Image (cartoon, helix red, strand yellow):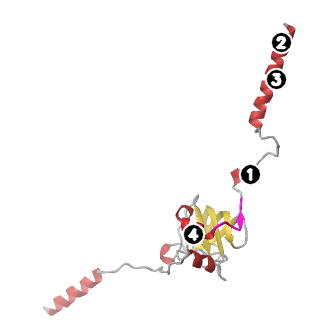
């Protein structure tokens, strides 16, 4: 009978498994995140692919930089992260803009993990308020001005103005002839 009790207790303990966490880290304040990071910037993810640049694998994420508080200014940066959250990898999504806190070491030029304060911009208000004005801003591709005209009238409305002027001129010419 004792054997059955011991066997039952042994099997019961096998069935109980507390939540396993391979990645655990201390939560940083915005100040600690800024101080401990090599680069801090906002950027939109344009590409996510397997990291072939280092022997550690994971993912290489390309971001179009919008604002930069710390680091070497660049319009585009690539960061590396582990391939899973269990290994502290950060899950980026293409097309989303993030506030990125990137670390640097010998293995990776720029590395992002779950332990950094990296977050989508819409969830990083506290950090953005703390960071204040960025040191560098990069223009949005759609906000660049294409024409160098000093006139506030766009080329489309300018064409319409010429057409109206031509019609008025034609009407005056026809009226003089008649």
Q: What element carries label 3?
A: helix
Q: Quadrant of residue 129?
A: bottom right
Instruction: Find the distance from the CA under tag 2 to the CA under tag 1.
Output: 44 Å
Whichever of callouts 2 and 1 sits on the residue coming sooner in the sequence is 1
Instruction: Find the distance from the CA under tag 3 to the CA under tag 1.
Output: 32 Å
Disc 3 crowd, CA 10 A, few/some/many (<14, 14-19, 20+): few
Residue at x-position 58% and y-position 58% = 95
The residue labelled by disc 3 is 166
Task: Please provide percent x and percent y for residue 127.
Answer: 57, 69
Instruction: Find the distance from the CA under tag 1 to the CA under tag 4.
Output: 28 Å
Residue at x-position 80% and y-position 20% = 168
Disc 1 crowd, CA 10 A, few/some/many (<14, 14-19, 20+): few
The residue labelled by disc 2 is 174
Q: Quadrant of residue 132?
A: bottom right
Q: Which of marks 4 and 2 is in front?
A: 4
The residue labelled by disc 4 is 127
Whichever of callouts 1 and 4 sits on the residue coming sooner in the sequence is 4
Q: Say if residue 124 shows up in the picture.
A: no
Relative to residue 174, is residue 42 depicted above or below? below
- The rendered magenta stretch, by its main secondary structure, is classed as loop
Task: Please provide percent x and percent y for residue 34.
Answer: 62, 76
Q: What element carries label 2?
A: helix
Does the magenta segment cover residue 50?
A: no
Q: What stretch is highlighted in magenta?
A: 132-138
Whichever of callouts 2 and 3 sits on the residue coming sooner in the sequence is 3
């Amino acid at each position: 009978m004792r054997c059955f009790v011991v066997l039952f207790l042994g099997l019961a303990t096998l069935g109980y498994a507390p939540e396993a966490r391979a990645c655990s880290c201390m939560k940083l304040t915005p100040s600690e995140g800024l101080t401990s990071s090599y680069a801090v910037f906002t950027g939109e993810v344009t590409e996510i692919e397997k990291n072939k640049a280092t022997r550690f694998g994971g993912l290489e994420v390309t971001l179009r930089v919008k604002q930069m508080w710390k680091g070497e200014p660049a319009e585009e940066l690539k960061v590396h992260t582990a391939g899973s959250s269990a290994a502290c990898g950060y899950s980026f999504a293409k097309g989303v803009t993030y506030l990125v806190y990137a670390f640097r070491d010998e293995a990776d030029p720029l590395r992002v993990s779950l332990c950094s304060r990296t977050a989508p911009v819409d969830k990083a208000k506290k950090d953005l308020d703390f960071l204040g004005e960025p040191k560098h801003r990069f223009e949005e591709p759609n906000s660049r001005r294409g024409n160098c005209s000093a006139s506030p009238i766009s080329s489309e409305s300018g064409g319409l103005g010429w057409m109206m002027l031509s019609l008025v001129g034609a009407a005056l010419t026809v009226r003089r002839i008649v």
